[in-house]
Amino acid sequence: MNRKGLVSISFRGIPAEKVATSAKDAGLSWIEWGSDVHAPYNDSAKLTKLAEFCKETGIGICSYGSYFRLGSDSNSLLPDYISAAKLLGTDIIRIWCGQKGFANYSADERATMIDAANEAASIAADENVTLCLECHNNTYTDCPEGAVEMMTAVNSKHFAMYWQPNQFRTVDENLTYADEIAKYTKIIHVFQWKGADRFPLSDGIEEWRDYLRRFDGSQKLLLEFMPDDRPESLPTEARSLDMIIGKENTK
């Protein structure tokens, strides 16, 4: 199974059709469309056209990268994002969790966030979709403690995680996070950053092989951002991902 793909926000300035054909030409099989530029949740005509183009191009849509913020945005908006995802033909929707790091939440705020998460998971279950939290800086899931607390408190197959390395933390810290949430993870965002600097994925072959050993091999692996923001670099990054997967094994 080819589980390699691309996050469309890697190329926000490029038309969606060019993003899709570039991904296909690079040997990728999947795209996660972002709701901010290429796939706005409130434009059904654009979403339908995009889904049709991807089908004609022969590239799958594995997920919808929304910018819905759990605990900040009203859960009443979720059905609109879910409808958008269904128009694209996917049942996985990425959402963000709050607007500050886990350590900055009080006990009362944590309880409120978990209530919102349980309500969101119930909506997702009714619609038979899965909401996935991104382990992003300055969100509730910026550390394994926050992510595990959220996953265990909600405990729903319709509420899951993404994983990506944190460029401001050590490899060992990232491995610990991966170990803690591997069983909850649906999709992995792949890039090679150190702090504010971006590097070719080829610089992190062994590092990424070690990361992927923490997972069971079912997750889609989506390239996110090129080291130079150029679509011309996508085939090279895709080949590096091939090299990583070629020696992948489960822990």
Image (cartoon, rainbow, N blue to C red):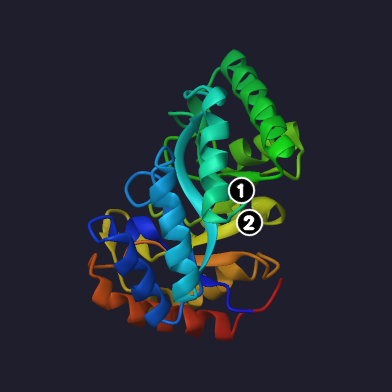
Q: Which label's residue is closer to the chain start, 2 or 1? A: 1
- Marks 2/1 in contact by CB < 8 Å: the verdict is yes
Q: How many marks?
A: 2
Q: Residue at x 46, y 78 (%)?
A: 241
**Which quadrant would the N terminus be assigned to in this image?**
bottom right
Which residue occupies the foreground of this view, 250 or 11?
11
For the residues labelled 2 and 1, the Cα–Cα distance comes to 6 Å
Look at the image and tell me whether residue 248 can be seen.
yes
Asked whether residue 5 appears in the rendered view, the answer is no
Identify residue type, mark 2: Lys
Identify the amino acid type marked 1: Met
Give the class, few, some or many, for how many residues have Cα within 10 Å of label 1's Cα (few <14, many ≥20): many
Q: Position of residue 167 (x, y in %)?
A: 39, 55
Q: Which is nearer the eye, 211 or 23?
A: 23
- Circle 2: element type: strand
Question: Which disc is residue 161 wearing?
Answer: 1
Disc 1 secondary structure class: strand
Write the residue at 44% across / 29% down: 100
> Where residue 36 sits: x, y (%)?
35, 44
Q: Position of residue 208 (x, y in %)?
A: 50, 71
Residue found farthest to the top: 108
**Residue sitting nearer the eye, 123 or 108:** 123
For mark 2, what is the residue?
186
Q: How many other residues sit within 10 Å of disc 2, few (<14), some (14-19) or many (≥20)?
A: many
Residue at image x 35%, y 81%?
Answer: 235
Q: Residue at x 58, y 66 (%)?
A: 220
